[in-house]
Amino acid sequence: MELTEIQRKFVVHWGEMGSMWGVNRTVSQIHALLFAHGKPMHAEELSDTLGVARSNISNSLKELQAWNLVRVTHILGDRRDYFETSVDVWELFRTVVRERKEREFDPTIRVLRELVSSPDFQKEPADAQDRIRSTMDLMNKLATWADEMLRLSPGTLDKVLTLGASVQKFVRGDTALTAPAAPAGKGDDPDAHHASLPMI
């Protein structure tokens, strides 16, 4: 498969970003290629397109499957395994959040809870106890927020994030500073400056 210049830049950049996030470059490039192409591809095609060894492609696909980012599919009349990813960016976002939470957040929260509940914890200096409790409290809140967000549909999640951005602007006073003054007289609405906030 011959990549367009746009596709090539997208795949290369995603591989570079993956390395910065601690993800193998080939893993990131395969996922980017499947996403940009939007159609199932078999391992040999992935290998030829990316110029990567077949064994590297195979190992990378296994990792993507473990993250639930790539699934196996088949084409009638072709015995080879084909691989595809979701082309819904919101669904991909939800998958990454869910997987990272299960792999990184949840185990850390369990360890922090074990530390706090240990009898030896009371022997630690008071300020050290406060820092550990604060860390656990923050991670608990973030985990609860993530769980709530993961229950939402992509469309509702989009609205929630848009609403959050509008609320931030309102809290900072941006809305009050930039909104035009409402004309006085009949029909005055004391809450008119809230009208720009999107509703769910």
Image: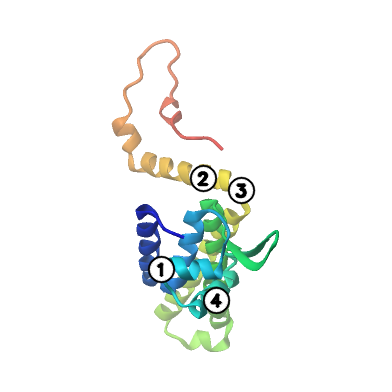
Using the image, tell me which numbered label, if any, was put on residue 58.
4
**Mark 3: few/some/many CA within 10 Å (<14, 14-19, 20+):** few
User: Toward the viewer: 186 or 130?
Assistant: 186
Q: Amino acid at mark 3?
A: Ser
The quadrant in which the C terminus is found is top right
Q: Is residue 132 left or right of residue 75?
A: left
Give me the residue at 55% from left, 59% from top: 146
Using the image, tell me which numbered label, if any, was put on residue 153.
3
Q: Amino acid at mark 2?
A: Asp
Q: Secondary structure at mark 2?
A: helix
Task: State the image coordinates of residue 46 (x, y, percent, origin top left).
Answer: 50, 67
User: Toward the viewer: 142 or 159?
Assistant: 159
Looking at marks 3 and 1 on the same chain, the residue that comes earlier in the sequence is marked by: 1
Looking at marks 3 and 2 on the same chain, the residue that comes earlier in the sequence is marked by: 3
Looking at marks 2 and 4 on the same chain, the residue that comes earlier in the sequence is marked by: 4
Cα distance in 3D space between marks 1 and 4:
18 Å
The answer to whether marks 3 and 2 mark residues whose Cβ atoms lie closer than 8 Å is no
Q: Amino acid at mark 1?
A: Gly
Task: State the image coordinates of residue 41 (x, y, percent, origin top left).
Answer: 56, 62
Q: Which residue, given by chain and number where applicable, does mark 1 sit on?
A: 18
Q: Is residue 6 left or right of residue 156?
A: left
**Mark 2: few/some/many CA within 10 Å (<14, 14-19, 20+):** some
Q: Secondary structure at mark 4?
A: helix
Q: Amino acid at mark 4?
A: Ser
Using the image, tell me which numbered label, if any, was put on residue 158.
2
